[in-house]
Image (spheres, rainbow, N blue to C red):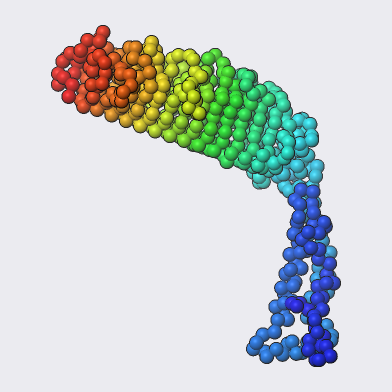
Amino acid sequence: MRGAATTPDKSGNAAPPIDFFSFVQAPSRDDSRWQTPSAGKHPGAVWTSVLALRKMSARRTIPHARDGGRLARERARSPQLNRRDAITVFGAAALQPLLNHRVSAAISRERSSGEIKAGVTPTDFSFPYGDVRRYGMSVAASPSDNAAALQRCLNASAGSTVVTIPGADAAYRVSGRITAPSGTSIALGAGATLQWVASEPGGSALLGSPSRPGIEVVGGDFRLSGNGKLAGPSPGVYVANEIGILCVGKSAAAMLSGFAIAEGVELSGWGSRGLALQFVNDVQVSGITVRNCGYAGMHFLSCRHGRIHSNTVGEIGPGTSGNAYGISCTHDSRSYAADPNAVGNGRNAANPFCTDFDVAFNTVHDIPVWVGVDFHGAYDCHARGNRVFNCRHGVLLQGSSGDATGFGGENNEVINNAATTRQMNGEPTTVTAVPRLGISVNGGERVRHRAVVVRANTIDGFGDSHNTSFSLQHSYTSAVEISGNRVTDWRGYGCYSLYSEGIVSDNEFGAVADSTNAACIFVAIGGELKILRNRHVVNGGRAALYGLYINSPSDAPYVIEGNDFRAVSRQPFASHNGAPLSAAQIVGGRPR
């Protein structure tokens, strides 16, 4: 045996070795002495060191072929302890107090520099730094005590240690407002739930009103991840400015920077918004779920450089003032028209539109009050690959509202989205109100929406027979591209245009749900458009009355080429009151 001396038997052969490590009291891995209240089995410093000593001794006692077994024969001739073995044994005994001290230190951790700086004294030193239980948080504690414990943990850990909230067989009840300092990183254990039993006013003002946040992020570089939940106290009802996570920077010129939530986090049951950010730069929200909130799932105001990817947002309502949102990129529109930069360069306004936000691959569902994906004005933004179910409106990337109604953004895209009024399970919509807009990219009368692309989207079930809403809509736009979209089960006008300049091409309009007043493309007035290669494909379904309908005879001629509207039931190319287009309305005198 390695690390052992040997004695000869009567035959002169080496007797079974004596294991001198039996004198060193090294407990087994399952020994209760290695247990801690939180960590379970702990291999410990002693076990590691004893194994190391065994290996050291083994390296000194294994005979080598090149010595002809000399070392073994020498030990066989002497019943005495090998000097080096004795040193090993007594050295291990001498190390024992030091090793025990290391185990004790591992079990009982001293105050960290972060705890000292924050003036925080843990309530249970046996838990690791950053573990909320170190500061008194438990499923048995009161909501106020848990809130205080979580706050101590965040204060002590910010900028240095990840805050860990382990999963438990019950929720950690919390109340009131928790603040997350700069550099906060929180990891939710699988199944961990923070359940707010009440919210309180006292958070930063949002849109001029006090907020009631669960967690308010008051510094940059915030991170939250893990398969856990932040549950609010108000599922299914509207409570003004009650927000799961709130982060508000000082201004557009002094933004907070760095905000990320990812990896399975769920926000639910908040009376207003699950997540609300204003004046924040570098935003990443991916792979989370937001549901059952009163007004909006995610709300971004005057934020820059956002990546909102692969999230699920749904069951938003009842809303307020007829509005509710899944994912919304917007701004504070109050007094916007009076801002000196509003017309010349809105990017420099005090409350600008969101800039460089990529809202992609999200699933938004069940918002019958209003809209799935929304931009109230935007610069350099993208809505890509999103799926929208059972919302009154699908994707609205258009001008703003309120005092900013007349203003649009620029350089935006709506690409490869699928919006349907049906539910996720394929059942008919629960939306009863009209109008119903599929995709709209309207601009404003004072500032048009410039350089906007709507391409390769599928729009199903939108529009109405009174022609007050449409599957595709673009008003007050310039350099617009509406191309390669597919419209199915639609009503009214498949694509509606008003005071727009650009191209409408290669769109397919399927069978209509109701042919009343239906036209595939309706140009109201003031257009400067190329209308190319669009088609109406019925496949045995109900046909629209009109293909292309240009309502204003006084408009300049339109370029009309390669369209196929032969499937319509009344007039492929119509003018005011349904009459055939005149030669004066078409470049070249007739459709080609």
Q: Quadrant of the C terminus?
A: top left
Using the rendered view, name the quadrant where residue 245 is placed: top right
Q: Residue at x 36, y 25 (%)?
A: 487
Residue occupying the far front of the picture: 540
Q: Residue at x 64, y 24 (%)?
A: 235
Relative depth, front residue between 50 and 518: 518
Q: In front here: 246 or 268? A: 268
Furthest-top residue in this view: 577
Q: Residue at x 46, y 35 (%)?
A: 360
On screen, residue 304 above or below 226: above
Q: Position of 298 compared to 97: left or right?
A: left
Q: Position of residue 492 (x, y in %)?
A: 36, 15
Measured as percent of width and height from the top left, residue 316 is found at 56, 23
Where 180 sits versus 466, above or below?
Answer: below
The answer to whether one can see residue 440 in this image is no
The N terminus, quarter of image:
bottom right
150 lies left or right of 554? right
Residue 222 spot, x, y in % from top left? 60, 38
Residue sitting at 24 percent across and 27 percent down? 533
What is the total number of numbered labels drawn onto the structure image?
0
Q: Is residue 80 above or below residue 296?
A: below
Residue 121: x %, y % from top left = 79, 42
Can residue 25 be seen from the camera position used here?
Answer: yes
Q: Quarter-wise, where is residue 146 in the image? A: top right
